């Protein structure tokens, strides 16, 4: 559905996007992450035909963006970061105008599309307002409604939750989760919890290059320098601690509360060394019920910091 093939864009001799290669399959929701100035917005503009590439190719819906830009725009929805809107139009007129620009000329079909976009994006309370009177949250909803009014197969959303309060972020998240049932989405955001909640896959770029590509879970596992396991067993604490410390592979052990249990332990082992099976066997052998056992993973925020910090160093 979306391909970047050695995609490159320079400004003043400096590469903002430097030989990107990735492919997004039909039905995937991909989070596109990176620090400010990493090249996210430039990449999205290249994929949507708003900027020409200096080198490489952008392919969307099996069409080359350089040669079939208008066809791709007809089949793609794009929400730019700055979300340009006509301030003097009311919401309904703004949507009708967007539908006309998208080639929906039949009045009945256009009216149906406008009504659907209003319902999907939660704009019913704002339909009679001028765009200039809308709150930031409603402006983002209107931008999304304009992006989906022609029922595109692909959606490219640049910072769709930028500037929203927590309630508005939750509403946009719910909308994205609903849209992902039928569409392929590429979205950039600085709110990493949104990526973890909505995206099947994460691409992280820094200085115009990809530094990571995978599911949030796989990226977390790949970057772990040690395994951390939180365990609580029901039995004599001192005896449990002694038995756990003797397990092969345990590098460090200390008592802690685990999920509200007083007598728990944190076990550390080398990366790739999974202690859970050994603990299960020990619990069965000693008849100590497992009250809690949880593998600690790097958060997406920690993964992001680690990759972008190391790339800059």
Image: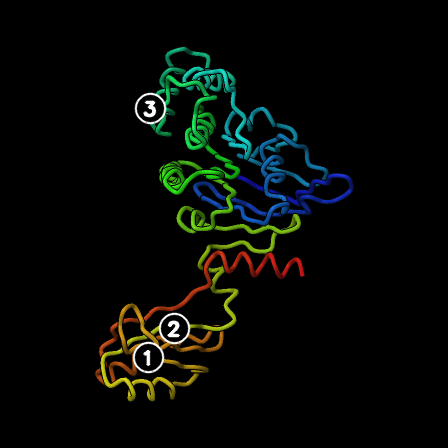
Query: Closer to the N terminus: mark 3 or mark 2?
Result: 3
Q: At x 46% / y 63%, what residue is drawn?
A: 298
Q: Secondary structure at mark 3?
A: helix
Question: How far separated are the C-alphas under marks 1 and 2?
Answer: 10 Å
Query: Closer to the N terminus: mark 1 or mark 2?
Result: 2
- Vertical comparison of 214 with 283: above or below: above
Q: Secondary structure at mark 1?
A: helix
Question: Foreground mark, 3 or 2?
Answer: 3
Question: How far separated are the C-alphas under marks 3 and 2?
Answer: 49 Å
- Vertical comparison of 99 with 209: above or below: above
Residue under label 2: 229
Q: At x 28% / y 78%, what residue is drawn?
A: 263
Residue under label 1: 279
Instruction: Specify the quadrant of the image occupied by residue 73.
Output: top right
Circles 1 and 2, Cβ within 8 Å, touching? The answer is yes
- The foreground one among 166 and 174 is 166
Instruction: Specify the quadrant of the image occupied by residue 285.
Output: bottom left
Residue under label 3: 125
Instruction: Specify the quadrant of the image occupied by residue 62.
Output: top right
Query: Closer to the N terminus: mark 1 or mark 3?
Result: 3
Pointer 3 local density, CA inside 10 Å: few below 14, some 14–19, many at least 20? few
Q: Secondary structure at mark 2?
A: strand
Looking at the image, residue 295 sits to the left or right of residue 298; the answer is left
């Amino acid at each position: 559905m979306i391909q970047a093939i050695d995609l490159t864009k320079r400004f003043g001799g400096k590469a903002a996007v430097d030989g990107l290669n990735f492919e997004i399959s039909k039905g995937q929701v991909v989070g596109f992450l990176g620090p400010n100035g990493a090249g996210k917005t430039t990449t999205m503009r290249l994929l949507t035909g708003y900027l020409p590439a200096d080198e490489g190719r952008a392919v969307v819906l099996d069409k080359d963006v350089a040669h079939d830009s208008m066809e791709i725009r007809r089949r793609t929805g794009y929400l730019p970061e700055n979300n340009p809107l006509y301030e003097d139009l009311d919401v309904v007129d703004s949507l009708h105008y967007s539908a006309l620009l998208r080639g929906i000329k039949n009045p009945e079909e256009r009216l149906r599309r406008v009504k659907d976009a209003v319902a999907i994006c939660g704009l019913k309370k704002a339909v009679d307002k001028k765009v200039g009177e809308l709150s930031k949250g409603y402006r983002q909803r209107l931008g999304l409604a304009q992006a989906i009014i022609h029922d595109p197969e692909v959606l490219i959303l640049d910072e769709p939750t930028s500037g929203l309060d927590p309630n508005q972020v939750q509403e946009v998240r719910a909308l994205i989760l609903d849209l992902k049932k039928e569409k392929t989405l590429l979205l950039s955001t600085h709110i990493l919890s949104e990526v973890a909640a909505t995206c099947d896959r994460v691409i992280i770029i820094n200085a115009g290059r990809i530094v990571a590509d995978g599911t949030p879970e796989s990226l977390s596992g790949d970057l772990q320098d040690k395994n951390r396991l939180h365990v609580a067993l029901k039995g004599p604490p001192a005896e449990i601690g002694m038995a756990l410390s003797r397990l092969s592979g345990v590098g460090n052990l200390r008592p802690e509360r685990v999920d509200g249990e007083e007598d728990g332990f944190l076990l550390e082992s080398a990366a790739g060394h999974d202690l859970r099976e050994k603990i299960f066997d020990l619990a069965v052998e000693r008849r100590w019920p497992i009250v809690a056992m949880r593998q600690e993973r790097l958060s997406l925020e920690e993964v992001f910091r680690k990759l972008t910090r190391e790339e800059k160093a």
